[in-house]
Amino acid sequence: MPTPVLMPALSPTMEKGNLSKWLKKEGDSVKSGDVIAEIETDKATMEVEAIDEGTIGKILVPEGTADVAVNTPIAVILASGEDKSSIKESGNGAAPVAAAKSAEAKVSAEPKQEAAQPPKLDIAPEADVPAGTEMVTMTVREALRDAMAEEMRRDGDVFVMGEEVAEYQGAYKVTQGLLQEFGARRVVDTPITEHGFAGLGVGAALGGLKPIVEFMTFNFAMQAIDHIINSAAKTRYMSGGQIGSPIVFRGPNGAAARVGAQHSQDYTAWYSQIPGLTVVSPYSAADAKGLLKSAIRSPNPVIFLENEILYGHSFPVPKLDDYLVPIGKAKVVRPGNNVTIVSWSIGMTYALKGAEELAKKHIMAEVIDLRTIRPMDIATVIESVKKTGRLVTVEEGWPQSGVGAEIAARVSAEAFDYLDAPVTRVTGRDVPMPYAANLEKLALTSVNDVVEAAKAVCYR
Amino acid sequence: MAVAKKTQPAQGVSRASEAGAVTEFSKDQELAAYRDMLHIRRFEEKAGQMYGMGLIGGFCHLYIGQEAVVVGMQMALKKGDQVITGYRDHGHMLACGMDPKGVMAELTGRRGGYSKGKGGSMHMFSLEKNFYGGHGIVGAQVSLGTGLAFTNKYRGNDNVALTYFGDGAANQGQVYESFNMAELWKLPVIFVIENNRYAMGTSVSRSSAQTDFSKRGVSFNIPGEQVDGMDVRAVHAAAEKSVAWCREGNGPFILEMMTYRYRGHSMSDPAKYRTREEVEKVRNEHDPIEQVRNRLLQKKWASEDDLKKIDASVRSVVNEAAEFATHDPEPDPSELYTDILQ
Ligand SMILES: Cc1ncc(C[n+]2csc(CCOP(=O)(O)OP(=O)(O)O)c2C)c(N)n1
Ligand SMILES: [Mg+2]
């Protein structure tokens, strides 16, 4: 029977792609592994390989077609002995079967749907952005890259180092173009040796340089955590103030999609415990840019926690020559007076969508983006709680000793009289991250969790 | 050419005995190797296809091109020997005799998977088959595998722990901490370095000061050998020798397998760091399966028809696994909170 070749999904986040080029034509024989076509995805150009032996019976989607949905039949392969006429009989019949099967699979394969779309919300620019400043739309990924590029232009001691940051252009393409602009002296590909290069980075910082160390993901920074804490965080203190480590450790933190227990972990609470570290975790592209620039200029070691799912989200960013966001300041992103919701990073997607849902139920939530976790701007949170009397914290990490626990303790201690309900935490479930689509969805925080928690503290 | 043609004696490596010419396989060995390698290849092709259909998510690292390594090594093992590896693990599990249905169902995250759908492509285990994972943190399996060997020594049996890792992993610090302990305590561990020339997009020459990985144990006095990892007979010969070395209580052994991965690092790797010609050349001139196939035909140990039959039976096993993995239900929601503690 003729086998349909379907538009493949080549990354966990791909929904459609452009069929840029056919490398085989109708009638060409192929064996499994042969590259038959090139497609462009959201991140890169990829090759499609044949999976069966035979000849290309028919090309169904011509090259140059944009936005071909995943699982669309793009060609038909004939097995030996079959000729083109069999396509009409069974070829078209075969395709929908395969497509239907995977459509059913897709339902369960998209646990991140609700977090994947940034809510439509105009986030007011920083108070000190001059009125009339032009706003440009860019992704978090681009904002981070621009921040590094601007700081590298400004200061010759700033360099970036990590696995695949240079020639590969970054495993998640955050360092795209930096090698081309700054050269291999300042954009350094390392071997896979996190403990070693993190220590080397701290050593370079002690020596007076300003390293940006990229961890491919923060899961791998666990290999290096001794240097982050024992070497970077404590040296200023241990040297009586003589030597500091002006270093930024950055990379994606938290769960991506379907990558399992060892690759899906939120380290915010871990690092936020350490005196000597600054911990930043932005949500919007503007904050990503302004905070990363501030982090690079900081004389102290900064843990800069990004999020893979947010990399592709777009936000307005002020078009200014030198846009800085101060470290240690939270931001009221949505005003309201019934309940305060505090979050940061990807948690903000749940918080903001939750707030929208709650508004429909006439519960007006004030949403605060913490942005910096250490030092924590608890004053802004308390200010809000004085008005609302209720507080919900939202994070992807585990509940025990999480950031929400810290916020709850501080607010209870400093604003107990203003609280009309117990502080409530929305967190990831207290389990290692499962792989199965349905279990992963259950393990993660959700918009519904936020809505339910807010309703509960409002006694609704 | 990237892949070494012959098993070479590693120079400057103490106690590495002369690696001889490739020992010919018997007809049965050739046929078994052919079938086992083809089984892995077809399984991986199917997995790639299912990933494209959205049935498999996250990271999925295919083993296509490297099949001779696990198949040749496994032929030298006996009951009780342990195997551990990283995330590129499907081939290792199939070679250990794990059920392709259970492996594929883990890839799709279903309840019939080896980890009940909780582990995924990178994290599978089978105590029954002595397969200890399935590890996502590059280099972690090296210390763990050394610990499995410690268990064997502690218990006083003559089992061997096969510890597989990549050329990229070979630069992690814990690898050398493990080498030192393994030799110091004469632990029966074979460090199988699968040198497929790249760690993600970084070629060996861009990551490694010493690119001859068989020499990485020199300062610890661990013998090492470079092996043509595309020739299953060479792998098998090296396996026999190193396994015997370990069973006799001589301590660890390093095998550097010169191999190649045909596909991208994972499914979402655009693979711009090497040319299509480079991949084609290895496929056309060194393919591990084609080599056996050609010998089988040349020696008239099998006809084209016989080989087609093998292919058909392998395909049907793989299709059955794919069917199972597509229709097996997802884990019960209550499984979210089980298996955390006993
Ligand atoms: C500690 C750690 N750092 C980085 C990664 C990301 N990563 C996964 S695989 C890989 C490349 C490993 O290459 P190699 O050891 O040669 O094995 P291969 O993939 O070629 O089989 C990297 C950098 C990781 N999983 N763990
Ligand atoms: Mg490799």
Image (cartoon, coloured by chain):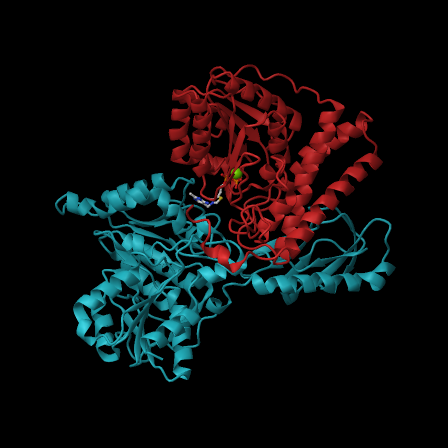
Q: As displayed, is residue B110 above or below residue B191?
A: below
At x 38%, y 53%, the residue is A251
Figure quadrant of residue A37? bottom right
Question: Is any part of residue A327 visible from this angle?
Answer: no
Q: Position of residue B330 (x, y in %)?
A: 58, 57
Numbered-mark total: 0
Query: Is residue A346 or residue B36 the one in the foreground?
Result: B36
Figure quadrant of residue A90? bottom right
At x 65%, y 40%, the residue is B40
Q: As displayed, is residue A184 above or below residue A363?
A: above
Q: Position of residue A287 (x, y in %)?
A: 33, 66
Q: Which chain is red?
A: B
Specify the quadrant that holds the N terminus of chain A: bottom right
Query: In this structure image, what is the colour of chain A?
Result: cyan
Question: Is any part of residue A339 visible from this angle?
Answer: yes
Specify the quadrant that holds the C terminus of chain A: bottom left
Q: Position of residue B319 (x, y in %)?
A: 71, 49
Query: Is residue A374 or residue B13 the one in the foreground?
Result: A374
Figure quadrant of residue B8? top right
A294 lies left or right of A12: left
A341 lies left or right of A252: left
Q: Residue furthest front?
A: B342
Q: Residue furthest bottom?
A: A362
Q: Residue furthest left?
A: A240
Query: Is residue B111 or residue B30 the one in the foreground?
Result: B111
Q: Position of residue A15 (x, y in %)?
A: 58, 64
